[in-house]
Amino acid sequence: MAKKLLALLLLVSLFGFGTAQEPIRIGVNLELSGRFATIGNSTLQGIQAAQQQMPTIDGRPVELSICDNQTTPEGSINCASRFIDEGVVAVLGAISSTMSIAAAEPLEEAGIIMISTSSTNPATTQIGEHIFRMAYTDDFQGKVAARYATNDLGASRAIVFRQQDDDYSFGLAGFFAEEFEALGGETITLDFVANTVDFSAQINDARGFDADVIYYSGFCAEGASLMPQLRQQGFGQQILGADASDDSQCPVGGGEAFDGYIFTGFGGPEVLSGDAAARATDFAAFFDVAFPDATDFNGFTLAGADAYNVIAEAVDVAGTDEGDAVLAALQGLEGFAGVSGDITYAGTDGTPADRTIAFFTYQVPGADGSEWSSEALFGLGTGE
């Protein structure tokens, strides 16, 4: 009997029967507190929902190492340093361009893959070959907004509000103004900084410019203060925003000042087509069960899920979590069936070859007696 037990133990030690597989560790660097916390947490829930759907890769459990960058560049760098020490296979996040760029530099130097879930500043993926994104870029987002303002709204003069200490807002405002002026329009750019609550100086500067439209390239942390002040001071023009406005902080904090507000954002089930729409719809149904108390389900949620999904696919294709092999698999990814649409990195700089952007509008009060709601107007692909 003792000999049989010894033989069995030898087999276990040789072939690993009954032993736990080493987990695959993935870092998650998100703005879970601070000014962008609503978007950060909806992104995290998307990642976690995707992990629930696929808790193992090639038989190995996936372990998420979650780090709150507190919506600061310093916090994002600290998260990156932690992940380098932990030896993660990849990092998902950050959501914003400023925090993504801060983390990308040390991660690139360490040779660790990073997929920013929603950084849209073109510079992010230029940092190096290990840096990817799940979003379109602001040269596209700013241009489609300017064309909409010109062609659909008939605007020829635009006030642009820009957060001058943020990479995303600063770059996006520039792309919008450049395209708007190329189409024959005139613009004036008014700057503010993070945590501004009193916009009286900027509003006074705006009075002398007879604008047809207002473009806001900032975040809801400040927009929830700016929009009511604009409306109270008699600015009744159509206001356009961007994907950072896809955040419940805007309609909740700014109230009826956001009624009729139009913004661009990640396309969801309403504007995706064919199989992509079906996948997004199925994921939304799963998400509702997994997170019944979630306040925001939007394109950021889908982007978080797909950041997880493409890493899982790359590890599976590589057959290992060794960095160079996973990087090669990710760089060769083509036509991956994601919940946010098909994803191709092959032949790109780390920006997906085709993404869908949508135009949305807020209703405050919302549909069916809700406090607020949003409605997708139409979608556009980056390849169109």
Image: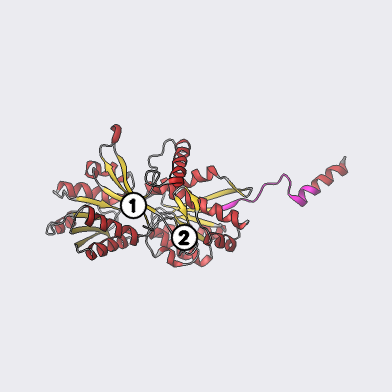
- As drawn, the label of residue 132 is 2
**Residue 136 in the image, given as x and y percentages of width and height:** 39, 57
Neighbor class of circle 2 (other Cα within 10 Å; few <14, some 14-19, many 20+) is many
Question: Is residue 153 placed above or below 256 in the rendered structure?
Answer: below
The spot of residue 55 in percent (x, y) is 57, 45
Q: Marks 2 and 1, how far apart in space? A: 19 Å
Label 2: element kind: strand
Q: Amino acid at mark 2?
A: Phe
Q: Residue at x 47, y 40 (%)?
A: 282
The answer to whether residue 285 is magenta is: no
Q: Residue at x 43, y 64 (%)?
A: 125
Which residue is painted at 19% across and 55% down in the image?
154
Q: Residue 77 placed where, x, y %?
A: 45, 60
The residue singled out by tag 1 in the image is 243
Front in this rendered view, residue 161 or 82: 161
Q: Quadrant of the N terminus?
A: top right
Q: Tell me whether the residue at label 2 lies in contact with that at label 1, contact meaning CB atoms closer than 8 angstroms.
A: no
